[in-house]
Amino acid sequence: MDTRDKALDMLRRAMSGEEKLWAIWWIGGLCCELVYVGLYMIEDGLRPFSNLGGDVVSVFKLLVFATWASAAWRCSRNVERRGLTLAARAALVLLVGATGATL
């Protein structure tokens, strides 16, 4: 199994809520952040030339974030202590609110 297959398998497990929360929170979150920042830079470069192009990239940026947040929410029960589920979900609600406030 190559790296791409492993990543796709991890994404499939995450979206079905089967992956460990720590893996989605830290590994998935880091990958999401790198893609998000890259798309932000592309969006920022497109804005002076095309608002539509910037808007399309912005939609992809939000889809990346929403995919990660959805996976993290679904996997938040895969922890040893119930309090960690509540903490992860509270953090996700705050992150979604903060991201929405920056639009």
Image (spheres, helix red, strand yellow):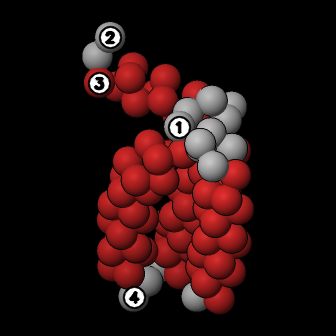
Q: Give the residue pinned by disc 1.
A: 20
Judged from the image, the secondary structure of the residue bearing numbered disc 4 is: loop
Q: Earlier in the sequence, mark 4 or mark 2?
A: 2
Give the alpha-carbon distance from disc 4 to disc 3, as whole Å: 37 Å
Q: For the point 54% across and 70% down, which residue is it? A: 58
Task: Decide: is 35 above or below 49.
Answer: above
Count every numbered label the image shows and give the total.
4
Q: Give the residue pinned by disc 3.
A: 3
- Looking at the image, residue 15 sits to the left or right of residue 38; the answer is right
Q: In which quadrant will I find the C terminus?
A: bottom right
Whether tag 1 and tag 3 are in contact, CB under 8 A, the answer is no
Give the alpha-carbon distance from disc 3 to disc 2, as whole Å: 7 Å
As rendered, which of 66 and 42 lies closer to the eye? 66
- Looking at the image, residue 88 sits to the left or right of residue 10; the answer is right
Please state which of the two labelled residues, at mark 4 or mark 2, is closer to the viewer: 2
Picture coordinates of residue 21, whole percent (x, y): 54, 45
Q: Which disc is residue 86 wearing?
A: none
Please state which of the two labelled residues, at mark 1 or mark 4, is closer to the viewer: 1
As rendered, which of 74 and 86 lies closer to the eye? 86
Q: Give the residue pinned by disc 4.
A: 48
